[in-house]
Image (tube, rainbow, N blue to C red):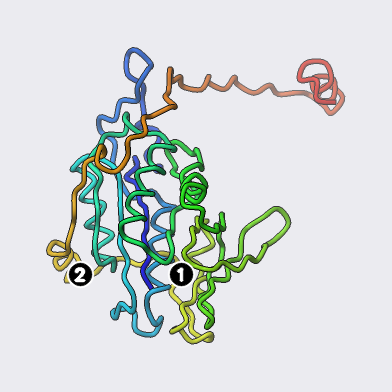
Amino acid sequence: MKILVAIKRVADPDNANKVKMAADNRTVDTTGLEWKMNPFDEYALEAALRLTENGAKPKVREGEVVVVTLGPKECETTLRSALATGADRAIRIDTTDDELDGGRVAHALKKIVDEEKPDIVILGKQAVDGDSNQVGQILAELLDYPMATFAATIQEESAGTILVGREVDGGVLNLRLTPPCVITVDLRITAPTSVYSSKTDATFTHNEGVRFAPLPAIMKAKKKPLEVKNLADVTEVSRCASYNKFAAPEGRKSGVIVKDVAELLDKLQNEARVL
């Protein structure tokens, strides 16, 4: 099985307090921000690795995992991290964030899919910076592939089909996909019993969460193939969405202490107007 995983470098969401706007409020000042792989893309990579191995022998890759990202040269650190955890090859499409939107990213990824011809394309359900949740769906439409979004479980079946459990309001909806297909994943995909390849015994339990690369794998990743392509070579589509202005949220007003329930109900009804 061959799996293509799309990943993105984002500012570490745990350091959101460092985010600030430029003086003109038209761009975000990234000075001092710490970068990491988009968390949902980490989950997508973990799902791909589990699908291309026997869970009991994770060091043996039974298929091929290719990671791709769009961004400047600095993004190669993120790609090398993915290679260190088990991916086989990497592709970087040279561009900058201000040249991209969801549609343009999807068109670029379509070109890569057409060239690589993977059995499955796996993405995180969204990036934690823009939170647009667009790329996977647009890509599936461009490819005319079957798709499952918000995947909580993925199981490769003996017939070659992929059984996906989607997180929906009120529970889990099971979909059976015939590759080639597109899947976007949610947090629960990294649970110990969420992903099974056809080579992994049904009684096997994976470790919780995403895997971390040992030092020998990090050193080995430096020699794994990393191909660079120009954005103009993979898509002729222009960006159609842009941000006109950024603004920090208004500060919260201090709370009010009320003396009794009667005063609380009065304020809720006459000031907050929620009753």
Give x and y (percent) for residue 11.
34, 40
Residue position marked by numbered label 2 in the rendering: 217
Q: Is residue 184 above or below residue 230?
A: below
Residue visible at 34% across and 44% down in the picture:
108
Residue pushed farthest top?
24
**C-beta proximity under 8 Å, tags 2 and 1:** no
Please identify the quadrant where the N terminus is shown: bottom left
Label 2 to label 1: alpha-carbon separation: 20 Å
**What SS does tag 2 mark?**
helix
Q: Is residue 211 above or below residue 113?
A: below
Please identify the quadrant where the C terminus is shown: top right
Q: Amino acid at mark 2?
A: Ala
Q: Quadrant of residue 214?
A: bottom left
Mark 2: give few (<14), some (14-19) or many (20+) Cα within 10 Å: some
Question: Is residue 89 toward the left or the right of residue 155 in the image?
Answer: left
The front one of 248 and 57 is 57
Give x and y (percent) for residue 4.
36, 60
Residue position marked by numbered label 1 in the rendering: 208
Residue visible at 44% across and 59% down in the picture:
122
Of label 2 and label 1, which has the lower sequence position? 1
The dot on residue 63 is: none
